[in-house]
Image (spheres, grey):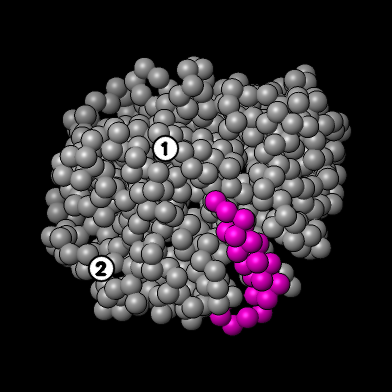
Amino acid sequence: MKKRQTALIVAVLILLNTFVGFSAINAEKTSASVSEAIDFSFPSIKEENEKLVITLPEATSYGPSNDGYLVPIVSKVISLPFKTEIKSVKVIFLDITEIKTTYAPKIATMPLTDSNEQTEILQRENDANMVSLFDGAFSYHVSAGRKGSEIVNYLVIQLQPIVYDERLKKVYSSNLVQIDISYDIPEQIVTIPDEYDLLIIAPQDFTEPLQPLVDHKNSHDIVTKLVTMEEIVGGSYTEIVGRDDAEQVKYFIRFALENWGIEYVLLVGGRNGGFTEPDWWVPVRYSDLDDGNEARYISDLYFSDIYDAEGNFSSWDENENDQFSEFSFMKNDIPDMYPDVAVGRLACRTKSEVATMVEKIITYETTTYGSTWFKQFIGISGDTYPGEDDPYFEGELATEVSSQLLSEHNFDSTFLWTSLGTFNGPEDVINAISEGAGFVHFSGHGNPYAWSNHPPNNHSGWINGPNAFEMGDMTNADKFPVVIVGGCHNGQFDVGLHNIVRDILIYGVKGYFFEAPFMFYHMEWIPRCWSWSLVNKAGGGGIAIISNTGLGYGIPGEEWNTGNGRWMEMDFFKSYTEGNTILGQAFSTNLINYMNEFYSNGDIVDFKIPQEWTLLGDPSLMIGGFE
């Protein structure tokens, strides 16, 4: 997999003439600028239920304006050399058309959680306090992240070319936007070494069952290096420092990126006991981004985000208070979040679990190519947010979009939907997956133990998929799908029986079983979470799964596809169909696409969604197997 950078290197050499390694991170810079004019079509404006619905062909998404109205958003993404310093971004909205109307645009709907509990549909507040017409109609951010085999700076400019003036009851549309950017480019461009593709980090106890995987990867030109936790923490790599084991692992990943050129990191190790706090074979980082619903959750994105836009180590703790990715009025860490390497985890707790995953990965990559079963897609869902007179079955619509994307690549689809009567309980899901499929998309509600969704227009009714204890009933042998899951906490892999002791000590027997917060029913005591139970099932189940470690989110009704979890789920399939056939490439592109579209919003939920979106699987996996 190495030795594929020649064309890019030649191109950049021609452009800038000078190349150095990561040691040149603090090089001198050269000033540059770029100007671009962007034309927009005239918007489509329809009146529905005494509200305006505004659409624009060039829109990349739809979301709330500063005053809360639902408007088209156009994201302009520019890739620049790593450590480029943005001096200024100027945006002028021109060719403005005035459209008088009786009604205001609709107010953007707030996202809802994907927990399998009752939910209430809310709308955003509209403060409608515009200082001038297009003030606040654009924003931008700069982050460092992976693009192919290079680290680049992403400059993302978000434009809202349509505004509504509540005082005059008029819509204003800009048909032309002028963008002027000035920046400083490093005179010496940082390049990545060309030694290894995949870094595996695991405890010494797991090295023996992992060796066949290392040999297999190397035999398929995925140049692989296995390093133990004992070598990283207090061992051979004495230059690696950090405030705790998690930060030491992250510093080591930076070392491996800068010295070996790794693209993929496989963390092999889940929970290893612990009562008041979990112990880990390979550490995790908890994000302290508190959205008002939960205060912390696991985020393996922490290990993927090595640099900020200036090339500094992305600590996720700007105020150095040992709270990571805080987001509040007084404490904002605002991490970069863009992946510089693709990270996946096998949350194994025993050698037996490691051996199971190694056998599955080797079997998948050596037998899947050219099989008919791989070209099957299964979409499983229902009416995610039922409402009166609401014809939108959000999860079903999301799985249909995923199917349409795959159909262009000759995939056939099976839909297990509550509206079709094809999803009536766990047996339907078990039987379908047992036939084999390349991809499975669940879109609905969950917790660490279960996944489910609603029948049509039935807010109190639930139809359950298989729970964590029923995964063993799947008999798909070596026909393993890549699984995408919309739902809360399905990927919360810090669960375990030890949590019973922890929570009784914190909440007492009453708070655990009989009164709020009823911690027993949070299902954090089960031996393995739903997602890991599906992937680690021997002789069946999935080969990899992407799901939420915390509360998932979606938008109800006609705005179902404008952002949040449904958008993230569908975009994974878009990323794959655009040529990202290595799992980590598809996953990292999925994360970057989301942040390119929503990071500039500054919305706490849009920061949270990428942080909890976690890959339990091998990031170097060749989707569909090796030819």
Quadrant position of the N terminus in the picture: bottom right
Q: Could you tell whether 4 is left or right of 551 in the image?
A: right
Q: In screen coordinates, is 151 left or right of 302?
A: right
Tell me which segment is drawn in magenta.
349-375
For image coordinates 80% across by 35% down, the residue present is 259
Residue 609, image x, y percentages: 42, 43
- Alpha-carbon distance for marks 1 and 2? 34 Å
Along the viewing direction, whichever of 537 and 185 lies nearer the viewer:
537
Check disc 1 and give the amino acid type.
Phe
161 sits left or right of 589 in the view: left
**Front in this rendered view, residue 172 or 49:** 49
Q: Position of residue 559 (x, y in %)?
A: 30, 53
How dense is the environment of label 2, judged by Cα within 10 Å: few (below 14), some, or many (20 and up)? some
Give yes or no for contact between labels 1 and 2 (Cβ–Cβ under 8 Å).
no
The reply to whether residue 359 is visible in this rendering is: yes
Q: Amino acid at mark 2?
A: Ile
**Closest to the observer, 516 or 420:** 516
Residue 316 is one of the magenta-drawn residues: no
Is residue 355 on the magenta stretch?
A: yes
Query: In the displayed structure, would residue 593 be above or below residue 172?
Result: below
Residue 547 image offset from top left, x and y in percent: 45, 53
- Front of the two marks 1 and 2: 1
Residue carrying label 2: 463
Residue visible at 72% across and 59% down in the picture: 213
Question: Which image quadrant is residue 255 in?
Answer: top right
Q: Which element is circle 2 on?
A: strand
Q: Which mark is residue 275?
A: 1
Q: Quadrant of residue 400?
A: bottom left
| Residue positioned 35% across, 57% down in the render | 449
Q: Residue at x 84, y 52 (%)?
A: 3
Q: Is residue 603 visible?
A: no
